[in-house]
Image (cartoon, grey):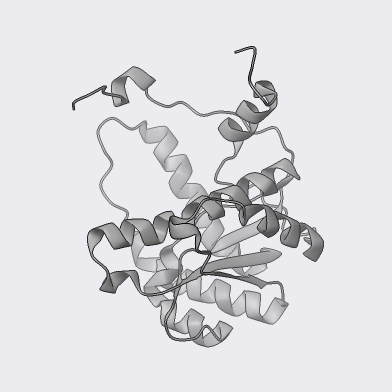
Amino acid sequence: MTDAPFDLTVTDELLTTTRAVRKRLDLERPVEREVLLDCIDIAQQAPTGGNRQKWHWIVVTDADKRRELGAIYQDASAEYLANPPAEAPNLDPKQQERVRSSSRYLRDVMPDVPALVVPCAEGDPLQMPLAGQASYYGSIIPAVWSFMLALRSRGLGSCYTTLHLNQAQRASELLGIPDGVTQVALLPVAYTKGTDFKPVKRPPVEQIVSFDTW
């Protein structure tokens, strides 16, 4: 493509190497407030349903609150990590064990991650019809992904986690989240140990794409 408006080498590398980072989070290096604000500012440019950004981002850097929020994640994730769902037959067992191992590692160190970010949105999707739920999450998850891309471009990493939502009320009480606001995820944020992330093996695109019918 000769008329591409961006350097595809750079953008494609960013898009294909923004990984779920767990074991390579640097727990010792602080994350500057300005960097977090810059990345969230970029995330605000993500498209939203009806062009309504009914978001609020809670950034937890206080050590005591990080420990408490991390403990909530540990408690909320215990059952899932102890009894993970059955593996799909098409998945590489070794790769899946690496994912489970890194998930257990993240559980153990979550209280020590330098910044924990909780993206929230106004409203209760459970009270919405299916189309409303899809629009609700589709109006904030692109912003979360943009945030993670912005982190990656600055030498930081994260991982999209949702297990703390099993005890969302505890997190709401800890963080002062008002009624009528839904937590969407818990994002551990830190500089990464190295930046040499690579694409991972995925199915050939022809196996997962159909044109005009299933």
Residue 24 appears at what percent x and percent y? 66, 46
Front residue of this view, candidates 44 and 107: 44
Left/right placement of residue 117 relative to residue 99 reads right
Q: Foreground residue, 173 or 113?
A: 173
Q: Quadrant of residue 68?
A: bottom right
Would residue 179 be found to the left or right of residue 30 on screen?
left
The quadrant of the picture occupied by the C terminus is top left
Residue 40: image quadrant is: bottom right
Image coords of residue 177 (percent x, y): 52, 83
Residue that appears at 41% across and 34% down: 94
Q: Percent from the top left, x then y, of residue 37? A: 73, 62
Q: Which residue is drawn at 73% across and 60% down?
A: 36
Q: In this view, does 97 lie above or below 109?
A: above
Farthest residue, direction front: 50
Q: Total of numbered circles in the picture? A: 0
Q: Where is residue 144 in the image (x, y as percent from the top left)?
A: 55, 55
- Residue located 72% across and 53% down the image: 26
Quadrant where the N terminus sits is top right
Q: Which residue appears farthest toward the top when viewing the image?
A: 2
Task: Tell me if I can see residue 81 in this picture.
Answer: no
Residue under the point 51% across and 87% down: 173
Camera sees residue 156: yes
Q: In this view, does 179 lie to the left or right of 25?
A: left
Does 17 sit above or below residue 146?
A: above
